Amino acid sequence: MLNKDKLLYTYKHRKIVMFLAKKYFDNEELNKQLKSHDMDKMYLLLFYENKDITEYHRNRSSHHDNELDKTELDYIEMVLDWESARYTKPDKPLNAYDTMLKYYPYLEDKVLPVMKKMGLDYSASDMEKDVVEYTKTLESSTIDDVKKELMDYLEFAFSEDTKELVK
């Protein structure tokens, strides 16, 4: 199967983003938006190489630094994305605050208030124990879990709940 490892990687990343969202916000509107987090990547990984998808995804996803208009929820999703990376992406060990300082200092006025709400407005190398424990539960994830995620998203995408999410 094309990109099986990347599909599993993205699946786990999505789960950590949602775990962090529930931990710090538990906001129904945010949870609904996060159902679409990186789903374009998951579907595209079925057909294309990851290197061909990355730029496409970053240019068309409002939770990435690009020219798209952003809402407060987009900035929250951006911070959750940065914070989750250190739990699922060994090549990205920085927490959200350090990611902002190193790569996106020009976004500080938009994302620092989000980090303050989360209590993550500082440099930290120690990972949070509950997030680490949850991450461990994802180690046994299978391609069947990915298939279920893809199918569940299709159900969601064709539901009435998605009408207000289309941007």
Image (spheres, rainbow, N blue to C red):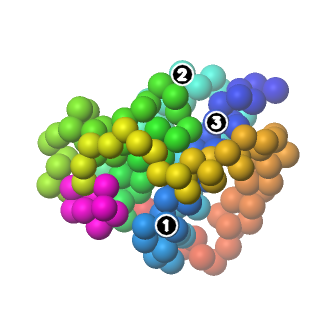
Query: Residue 164: in sight, yes or no?
Result: no
Q: Residue at x 68, y 67 (%)?
A: 156
Residue 6 location in percent, x, y?
65, 31
Residue 98 location in percent, x, y?
28, 39
> Of helix, strand and loop, which one carries label 1?
helix
Q: Residue at x 60, y 76 (%)?
A: 161
Q: Which residue is mark 3?
A: 9
| Above or below for 23 versus 55 | below
Judge left or right: residue 140 versus residue 99: right
Judge left or right: residue 41 versus residue 80: right
Quick one: quadrant of the N terminus?
Answer: top right
Q: Amino acid at mark 2?
A: Lys
In the picture, the disc for residue 51 is 2
Q: Which residue is mark 1?
A: 23
**What distance separates the C-alpha of mark 2 from that of mark 3?**
14 Å
Count of marks placed on residues: 3
Q: Main secondary structure of the magenta part?
A: helix
Q: Amino acid at mark 3?
A: Tyr
Which stretch appears magenta? 112-120
Rendering quarter of residue 73: bottom left
Q: Residues within 10 Å of mark 1 (few under 14, many from 20)?
A: few
> Of helix, strand and loop, which one carries label 2?
helix
Q: Amino acid at mark 1?
A: Lys
